[in-house]
Image: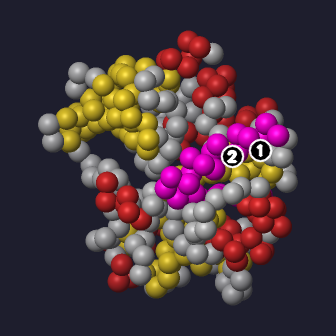
Amino acid sequence: MTPIRLRDFVEDRDGLIYAVSAYDNAERVGCVLRYVPDPAGKRVDPAGRHFSKLDFGPAFEYIREHKPEYLDDLHRVPPADIVRVYKPDERIDWIASRDERVKRLLSLFDLPAGSVGCTGSRLLGVENGASDIDLVVYGPAWFSAQAQLKRLVAAGKVPAMSEEMWRKVYTKRVPEISFDAFVLHEGRKWNRGEFGGTYFDLLYTRAYDALASAPAGKGRVLGRATIEATVTDASHAFDAPAVYEVEHETVSRVISFTHTYSGQALAGETIEAQGVLEQHGDTQWLIVGTTREAKGEYILSKTLMEQG
């Protein structure tokens, strides 16, 4: 059996369904509760089960009240309590068979077999008319998908993001940077788009052979800080968390737990980042996204801002 990894979903003995939000899942699976069985719930799976979808805050309140033993920085579910694992790559054909838009979108990309999936509500079959398309691409194939999306937009096969859609994304993310700065950074990422009146993401997830090297563990909190540093390695800048290796007097990594600042800077660029400093061994990491809204926390590419 393949390991449980980021962007899978898991179901526990009581029918609660969680989005896997971490790579370190051997002892307890790091996830966030998303769907709760509810006879009056508006989300209905193919088996006829009704669910209510919970936002981040209510999900933690539910776990605190009903499953306090799962409560941690995430919800940590013991493998023994898991009765089903939903894997985006294994269910992609089933998902595409249910939605012609997903099928057409996938047909535009040329990716290796087994390297693409779809997560979120579509993975469970509980999507509705407002559901986005959350495509997942694994390992090096993600960078091929990114390059292909850029070409598809240039060729007019996928429409360019409208200002209306950018504003929708900006409002959803509520970042600590201006709208113009947000679009300037987002415009070169090529990790999202519009298709068939639906918003879609290209979400990076590590291949199975790279899971062990993902950063894990919380360090000793030193306090809030703002730094300026040079990015030396951005190869996992689109991961979750996004990782930027940097050159700085005391900080070796800037890590973002919010999707807003994934892919925010390239290797060789100078960044300004504000977040919380943690001590990890003999070095420090600057953590961005220590809360759901990441208030007072951000990453900006000063290099891009000066060019833009």
Q: Quadrant of the C terminus?
A: top right
Q: Which residue is mark 1?
A: 152
Q: In the structure shown, which secondary structural element does the residue marked by tag 2 occupy?
A: helix
What's the residue type where badge 2 is placed? Gln
In this view of the protein, can residue 79 be seen by the observer? yes
Residue 141 vertical position relative to residue 285 in the rendered view, above or below: below
Q: Residue 264 placed where, x, y %? A: 52, 32
Colour treatment of the image: secondary structure
Q: Which residue is mark 2?
A: 148
Q: Nearer the viewer, residue 69 or 115?
A: 115
Q: Is residue 195 left or right of residue 186?
A: right
Q: Residue at x 39, y 28 (%)?
A: 231
In this view of the protein, can residue 33 be seen by the observer? no
Q: Is residue 158 left or right of residue 75?
A: right
What's the residue type where badge 1 is placed? Leu
Q: Is residue 143 magenta?
A: yes
- Stretch in magenta: 130-155
Determine the image quadrant of residue 164: top right
Q: Residue 46 placed where, x, y %? A: 71, 83
Residue 305 vertical position relative to residue 14 in the rendered view, above or below: above
Q: Residue at x 67, y 22 (%)?
A: 180
User: Is disc 1 in contact with disc 2, using a CB cutoff of under 8 Å?
Assistant: yes
Q: Nearer the viewer, residue 104 or 35?
A: 104
Q: Is residue 130 left or right of residue 271?
A: right
Residue 84 vertical position relative to residue 188 in the rendered view, above or below: below
Determine the image quadrant of residue 137: bottom right
